[in-house]
Image: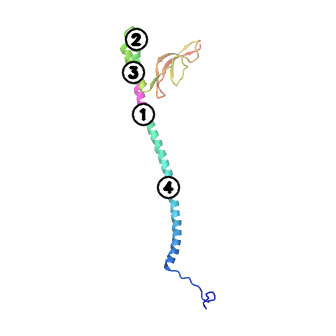
Amino acid sequence: MSSESNSDEIPVNIISENETENNSSEIDSESNVEEISNLLSLEKQKSSEYEEKLKLVLADFQNLSRKTQTDIENGVNSKINEFALDFLKIYDDFVRAKEVFSESKINSEGLDSILKNMDSLLKKYHIEPIDALGEIFNPNFHEAISIINDADLDDNTITKEIRKGYISHERVIRPTLVEISKKG
């Protein structure tokens, strides 16, 4: 009887060693893939954290760089303004000397060229005069040292510049000394 189905024998599958290794490697592969996937997720998270930290450090560096640059510019401008104030005292003396020479009808061509050079130097370092005559008094730019009564002018109109004021880098380094009007 050669019929296999009627036999009392229990069929047995024989697995070779090669097939056993394949099955266990499949199990190992699945656990390896899962483990690698977990490790990859952890590394991605670490990478994101490091990227955030790097962005914060870069932003801090840029802020520090801007602040340092601003501090340097302010320090340089402060020293220029300090020098300019001393220079303006000498400049004022030259202007007064020119006025005296002009009143006395003395040739002031030499003083004119010196004043022209001084004006160029002031302009080179962004030091501009404050125009005040005829303007309305502004305490940010002017310092009133006398008041005259004049019914023809509006209150606080500047009638006379006593000493020229100057602005450097949009900051007043010396206010203009002025005389202002009040309606009498």
- Residue sitting at x 51%, y 61%: 40
Q: Disc 4 residue type?
A: Ser
Q: Which residues are magenta?
A: 74-84
Tell me whether the residue at label 2 lies in contact with that at label 4, contact meaning CB atoms closer than 8 angstroms.
no
Q: Sequence order check: which comes first, mark 1 or mark 4?
A: 4
Question: How far is disc 2 from disc 1 in space, using C-alphas?
Answer: 38 Å
User: What is the number of the mark on residue 75?
Assistant: 1
26 magenta-colored? no
Q: Which residue is mark 2?
A: 100
* Residue assigned mark 3: 118
The residue sitting at 49% across, 79% down in the picture is 17
Answer yes or no: do the residues labelled 1 and 4 have beta carbons within 8 Å? no
How far apart, in angstroms, are the residues tagged by discs 2 and 4?
78 Å
Quadrant where the image shows the N terminus: bottom right
Q: Nearer the viewer, mark 4 or mark 3?
A: 4
Secondary element type, mark 3: helix
Across and down, in percent, residue 45 comes to 52, 57
Q: Which residue is mark 4?
A: 47
- Mark 1 and mark 3: span between their CA atoms? 23 Å
Task: Judge depth for marks 1 and 4 and give the one in front.
Answer: 4
Q: Is residue 45 above or below residue 123?
A: below
Residue 35 in sight in this render: yes
Disc 2 marks a residue whose amino acid type is Val
User: Does dot 1 land on a helix, a strand or a loop?
Assistant: helix
Task: Tell me the crowding category of disc 3: few under 14, some 14 to 19, or many 20 or more residues within 10 angstroms, Cα based.
Answer: some
Seen in the image, is 14 located left or right of residue 97? right
Q: Which amino acid type is marked by label 3?
A: Met
Mark 4, residues whose alpha carbon is within 10 Å: few (<14), some, or many (≥20)?
few
- Residue reaching furthest to the right: 6
Residue placed furthest toward the left? 110
